[in-house]
Amino acid sequence: MRNVNIAAVSKILIAILLFGSSNLYSGLNLPQSSAKILIKGKNHQQLKKYFEPLEDGVPSIDTTVEKFLIKFFPKSFDEGCKEMIATWGKGAKGTASKVLRVVFLKNHSKNLQQVFLALTCYSSTSAFGDKFYDERLALLTIDSTSSSLVTLPHGNPCDTCSDLSRIGLNEEWKIGGKNAVSILFSTSTKNPCCEGDYLKEEVIEKYFLFDPPNIKDLLTIVKRRSERFHRDNTIDSVVVYETNSNINKDANGSILTIDVDYSLTVNNTPINQGVMWYAWDKKLKNFESNRR
């Protein structure tokens, strides 16, 4: 490992702790909150009729069903969307809009479908368009008698955060002989409300196991995290954490271990590196972590 100025590195890492969580704003993104909404009667039957014939995958969603489902999300999501867009300036105020799309659908049987959904909050003005928006994940479960919509936060509740998130399917897997998916969450503090001297961008990968009628959030791996600190008349400080994953499977295609090489650099200077690995425990039905 190269020789580095430990004092300088320490100052940068301290700055991460001090400035990385010091935004003095509120209402700048959608809530990171968990809620469960039960859907019965005719509303349930409408969802069952629509989703029951669909095959596994990422189907487009009918506009009527999309608008119908958006109404079931907690009121705080609608309020949070309006508040967020209002902070983008006079031209954006009153232009808050929401859309819903399927991230992945698993059709287990005639009487059980599980659908990962992404709710997107954006401004309908051309100035922002698809450049800036925020997304949250939810799970729709449809069985023979009722449906449920559960919001799945990918971060901690925060009234002072301005991170905007984008959500996308990464891949389908087998874990412990059951179906699973990994979903990517890309976040950035680049927000029209309050861009400043600090920029944080991060990509995490979350592994979800289908365990009908539930799902299990098994594992979260940070794929990449970069933080940039800008000060006038000085050179920007940039801290980057990166990982590379290697998946090992058994003869039946189920994940046995996930080996993760990681590295930390400060202004392109290597600071730390190593390996983490996650092994599937059949008895605990979860991943056990180790590091070296």
Image (cartoon, rainbow, N blue to C red):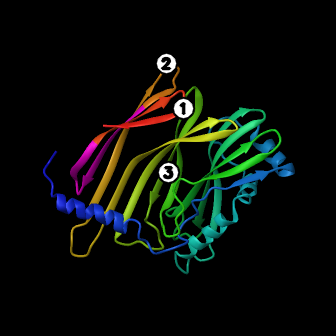
Dominant secondary structure of the magenta stretch?
strand
Which quadrant would residue 69 be assigned to in this image?
Answer: bottom right
> 102 or 241: which is nearer to us?
241
Give the residue type at disc 3: Phe
Percent x, y of residue 251: 49, 18
Q: Which residue is mark 3?
A: 185
Q: Secondary structure at mark 2?
A: loop
Task: Name the image quarter holding the N terminus.
Answer: top left
Position of residue 166 relative to residue 189, above or below, is above
Lower position in the chain sequence, tag 1 or tag 2: 2
Label 1 close to label 3 by CB (< 8 Å): no
Q: Which residue is mark 1?
A: 284
Q: Does the magenta segment cover residue 280?
A: no
Position of residue 233 relative to residue 1, above or below, is below
> 153 or 201: which is nearer to us?
153
Give the residue type at disc 1: Leu
Residue shown at 22% from the left, 53% from the top: 268
Percent x, y of residue 61: 69, 48
Few, some or many C-alpha atoms within 10 Å of disc 1 (few <14, some 14-19, many ≥20)? few
Q: Which stretch is magenta?
A: 258-273
Q: Which residue is mark 2?
A: 251
Position of residue 259 relative to residue 68, above or below, is above
What separation in Å lies between label 2 and label 3 (alpha carbons)?
A: 30 Å
